[in-house]
Amino acid sequence: MVNGVDSDLLHWIPLLPLAAAIYHGVMIGLVRRQTPQTVVAAVSCGAVILAFVVSFMALLDLLDQPETSRLLVDNVYTWIGAGIGTSAISAELAFRLDPLSAVMILVVTGVGSLIHIYSIGYMDDDHRDDKGFQRFFCYLNLFTFSMLVLVLADNLVLMFLGWEGVGLCSYLLIGFWYSDSFNAYCGSKAFIVNRIGDFGFLIGLFLLFGALVEAGHPAVSFSGIEQHFSSIVDRTLTLPAWLPFGTEWRLVNVIGLCFFVGACGKSAQLPLYVWLPDAMAGPTPVSALIHAATMVTAGVYMVCRMSFLYAAAPEASAVIAWTGGITALFAATIAVTQTDIKKVLAYSTVSQLGYMFLAAGCGGFSAAVFHLGTHAFFKALLFLGAGAVILAMHHEQDMEKMGGLWSRLHATRWVFLIGVLAIAGVPGLSGFFSKDEILVAAYASHVPGHDWLYGIGLLTAGITSFYMFRLFFRVFLGDCRAPVATRDHITDPGGFVVKPLWVLAFFSVVGGYFGLPQVWGDLIEMENSNSLANFLAPVLTSTEAHHLDHSTEYGMALAAVGLAAAGAALAWLLYVKRPGLPDRLAKQMSGIHRTLLNKYYIDEIYDAVFVRPLVAFSDRVLFRTVDAGLIDGVAVNGTANTIRSLAANGLKYVHSGLTQTYVFMMLVGAVAIVMYLLP
Amino acid sequence: MIPTEHVIALSAALFTVGVIGALVRRNLIVILMSIELMLNAANLAFVGFNRMWPGTEGAPAVDGQIFVLIVITVAASEVAVGLGIFLSMFRNRDSVNVEEVNLLKW
């Protein structure tokens, strides 16, 4: 089925973190003795760094191959084999490295290694439970394993295994400090909301496989699906008439939308984004690794992986683009009013993920992957920087109690500033190039209302700049608002915490040059400057787009930079120059302010519309009536009681104790059977 | 040669005698003997049918006769066990009347 070059390297990449996770699991669960922290840290970080090295070697192997057909395959064994002939399913445990998964594994293992190292310092002072350190690294390794399976999977079934695995690890790590029931609640919320998305993913998978079986080409591997995709592309699906969606649908649109529901859950898009802000209950390195750099980008990765499908499904793509655009703007407006430093970054992540979907929906798959990569660098940097600030503030996350840290955190301040500049889109830094490419992709696409989408993206860029500079000014400038007692003890955290930030800051600066858009490449007379897009081109299906001339693109970049500068200036005016102004503004526009502060009341609406009725229904109908009443009362106890009373009141006298009565009954029975059988 | 029907009729008669004996007699030893009658009626039917389908010259069918040997073996062991139980019962209760052993009931 797959015709790539065999490679024995690939299965080591997920296997190394898995081995580390199993080691930790055995030490915690079976050996039950406390492992020294140095050993735990060495095993965990060693495994992930080694995985990074192997990934790099695999990348070199990949680059050796001809440019248009780069593919490495590692077929371990047949995982699920069932059926025969044209309906046979054969899901291999096979890993596939093509340019797209190569970018992903480098991000996952690269950023993952840095965050593992950072975690040594961050979790060091955590004494809430004595095995917490090892438990944390166990989950973190397990997560890295699942994520690598997700991105390396050769087929949709194996991808789903990784997909569920990262969801599980996300749940475990959000509720890591489970003794506080709020954290456990947040973990459950993330898991349950993700289940809704996973349901969509599964339906999409079944529809796709069913259609391929009907067409006589059963396949679950990506290359197989792509190869036989033309046989199902014109199919239609008839929906039942009572559904409010009309009856005739193109099958690819339905499949595309189902998969996108999965992506919405995992990548926190409207309307399933609600779990991500609450996921900040987990330790900060978790927020950086899972809820900013890697797991939440799985949805974007999946959409790009299925680019051939979405290129053939313009309606589904339009839904993706609009969902992404609206989410980007929506989350950015919420981020403006949040005061918890991690909540701001969480809504910022939702917003940036919206950007990626905006690009993917507009056919700019390479722009989406590009932004995925740069965002992984600068958002991980911002989260880890925020973690350093939180450590320095003795686990205080409220920005109202920070301020004036510029003179106190000498090591953190510059890298944090770089992160803010990168996400705000300052020219030359990574965020500028990737965001620019997304806006260009949106403007040039054929998606209905693409100019509106471009406008939304542009506006979001301005708001992003505003809230990020607001965060920076509130934390680092102005007077220190910390309690007097802690004010003199605010210092930079140790080396494990600070040094990974430098690496991330370096890549936040130069990361943009891996995928320098051609329009900027021409400026320095460099051919094929967008090496990332060229690298990815063979695996991504391009869609038709308007051609834009260079002057338009320069103008668009100028507009984006102008809005970003305006946002920054506004933040400076409000939070540095006239610090009293925000409060007065908030009072004047108290309606809007309160709506934003309460996150558009989405959580409350969901609670009232879905959660409460569901809980009430489960409690009164399913639990009290069905389970306790019908199943326990009627079915189980009812049967037993009926039989018991029947037996006690008469049936028992059948057992007379007289052997010859029994013999007679037997004889009657035997005769009856013989009579029945005789013709 | 005696027709097979006669053999079967005798077997059926013996079996009926055995059944009635097992149903109406009270003495356990007699009941045991009646059971033996039934088993032997079955044996008779076995050999009768075997004689009816004797197989071919090269491959004679002996299934019925082999079954008879098995039944005889089983009957012998059954008698041994049965008589052992009756003996123990007689020692305990001074009786082998089947109507007096009716403790296992509601």
Image: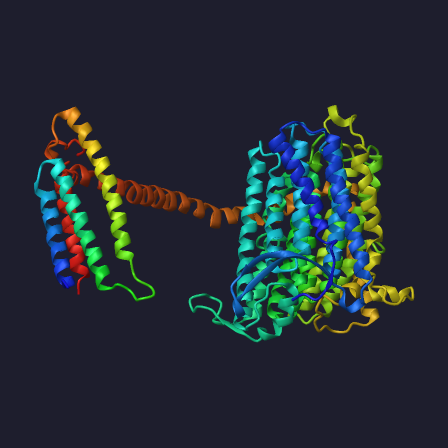
Location of residue A131 by image quarter? top right
Q: Is residue A465 above or below residue A522?
A: above
Which of these two is toward me, A637 or A360?
A637
Visible residue check, residue A444? yes
Q: Residue A392: percent from the left, percent from the top?
A: 76, 32
Residue at x-position 64% and y-position 69%: A226
Residue appearing at x 74%, y 23% in the figure: A485
Against A467, is A306 above or below?
Answer: below
Percent x, y of residue A244 = 46, 66
Considering the image in quadrants, where does the N terminus of chain A appear?
A: bottom right
Q: Is residue A562 visible?
A: no
Q: Identify the coloring.
A: rainbow
Front position in the image: A178 or A599: A178
Q: Is residue A419 left or right of residue A279?
A: right
Q: Position of residue A265 (x, y in %)?
A: 59, 53
Residue B51 in the image, given as x and y percentages of width and height: 22, 61
